[in-house]
Image (cartoon, rainbow, N blue to C red):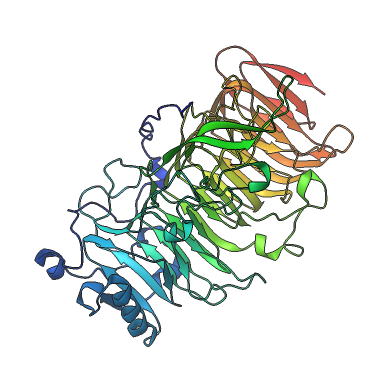
Amino acid sequence: MQDRQRQAPSQPIARREFLRGAVAVGAAPCLGALLLPRASRASPVPRADPAAHLSLAWTKLLPWERAVDISKVEGRSWEERLERAQKELSAQGGGVVYFPAGTYEMRESIRLADGIILRGADPEGATSAHDAAYDPPAKLVFPRYEPKLSGDGAPIDKAFRGIYLESPERGSGCGVVNISLNRAHVHFAESPEHKLGSNRLVVGCVLRNAAVADERVPDGTIGQKPWQRFTKWHHPAVSVVAHENVLLANNRFVPSDDSFLMKGYAMKARRIAGRTSPVIEYDVLFDYDFRPGLASGGYCIGAPGGEEPSGTPETHPWGFRRGIVIRDNYVYSTGRNAILFAGDGVLCANNVIRIQKDVWRPTHTGRDESSGSSTTDTRAVQMRGWRWRVEGNDYEVWRNWCSDHKYHINDGEGLMHENHCNSHIVDSYLIGNRGNAYLSLYKTGGIDGLVVEDNDIRVDRGLAIFVEADHDKQRRGHCRNVTIARNTTAGGILIAGEPASGNVVRGNRNVGARAPLRNRAKARLEENEGYEVTEE
């Protein structure tokens, strides 16, 4: 049994006018090894703020003018040259290590010193990550994992490299800009005590084969073979947190080409009548694209399991950091969260998300056989925190098939803020998004200000828009000042919460068969078309 043949993701829609403008990146010839072509050596080092068009005050203050061309630094390897360049810049208070157009064979993970930004050559050609032709000319290539499907397998410490911070608790003004990364993830973290620096960015990069192996696989206690490998569930391709100010913009995630099939992969079998063995085998893909995409603080900031209390800036200050911007990215995935964040005032805008259709997933954990009740956290955007604005995003989300290939695995949400490990909703916006999976403000425990306007959400079953403050009918949550207006749906609308005040559902239009509009929050209903209204 093999994973279904994967098709290239469909082309994104045209950008919304009010979000136009991309970070400067592009394509150039791919040239390699330690010797760079004469044209590259002669090309000027870019010194302008690549995010200037976004008008973020903090990016303008980064030392873009202070740059060292790595091709002019002495060293026997790129790692040695990079180390020397970082030392030179660190002595001056930080700066940019510039990579001219070319291919750079890296052997080890990179650790950035405080104030260091890696930057590739300026673009030639496509500049938007939404464009399939987008291809930064500076390419860092890291070691490939060469699987050995017998014996103890190949050790994972020979591959799965990344770009990290030398000092997560202090590193500020660090980033990666306009670089194509093959076989490397980006992880700008914090200390275990939630101490960390500010002003961190990943802009204009292409990522391919960006995943790590789960250290829990193989699990010999359930009969797994020593050579088995699986991608780590909660390890994004790009994860960046900061005390304040994060920019994740104009990055493109493309289908990976290093994934490999493992025949006879053993896992814990489901309990089904007639089965006698606790172990079952399938042919399982080590899938580099089965992991979260972009993340900034996807913390658990409230009680897990949907219980109270919800998180607040007082109880979980690390989950309410400010200055997070996630925009203009193209994220391809085969499952898991495409984008996830936790913060106060996060902007998540104009991202294109394509989660592959018809993927067969015999195991969702790497250890257990999947079923229809399994979960993969597959969704377009997971929102946590207060005052977020999710605007102008275009997404296609598809659930994976479970092991019997008869049922889909659970999940498959569009834009989701749920009470599990989260806060109440406070003064937040869902505006102008387009997708094939529902908007889910689900059992939030409370809503104080929410606008859901001008979205186009068309689902093939169930409701298109959930705005549900209640945990359940016995444990109701307050629902105040909610506006659901001018949305186009194929599927119904629910608004629920008690006590309720200031809520309005106006000017929404359902296409196709009439759908339910369930009002459990005393909302004022005005000029909605194509719905069957029930007041509860």
Which quadrant would residue 343 be assigned to in this image?
bottom right
Residue 28 x/y as whole percent: 19, 53
- Say which residue appears at 51% left-offset and 37% top-offset: 433
Q: Residue, x 75% and y 42% (percent of image)?
A: 444
Q: Residue furthest bottom?
A: 91
How many numbered circles does the render carry? 0
* Furthest residue in direction top, as rendered: 513
- Nearer to the camera, 109 or 56: 109
Q: Visible in this render: residue 136? A: yes
Residue farthest to the front, as pictured: 151
Q: Residue at x 65, y 50 (%)?
A: 384
Near-viewer residue (276 or 422): 276
Q: Position of residue 459 (x, y in %)?
A: 57, 23
Quadrant of the drawing holding the C terminus: top right
Q: In the image as oriented, which residue stretches furthest toward the right?
A: 474
Q: Is residue 180 above or below residue 194?
A: above
- Judged left or right of residue 257, residue 218 is right
Looking at the picture, how far across and down is residue 118, in whole percent? 35, 68
Task: Classify residue 400 by image quadrant.
Answer: top right
Q: Relative to residue 420, is residue 160 depicted above or below?
A: below
- Residue situated in front as seen by the camera: 191 or 433: 191
Residue 106 placement, left or right of 268: left
Q: Taking the image as drawn, is residue 65 in sight? A: no
Q: Quadrant of residue 301?
A: bottom right
Q: Position of residue 58 (x, y in %)?
A: 46, 69
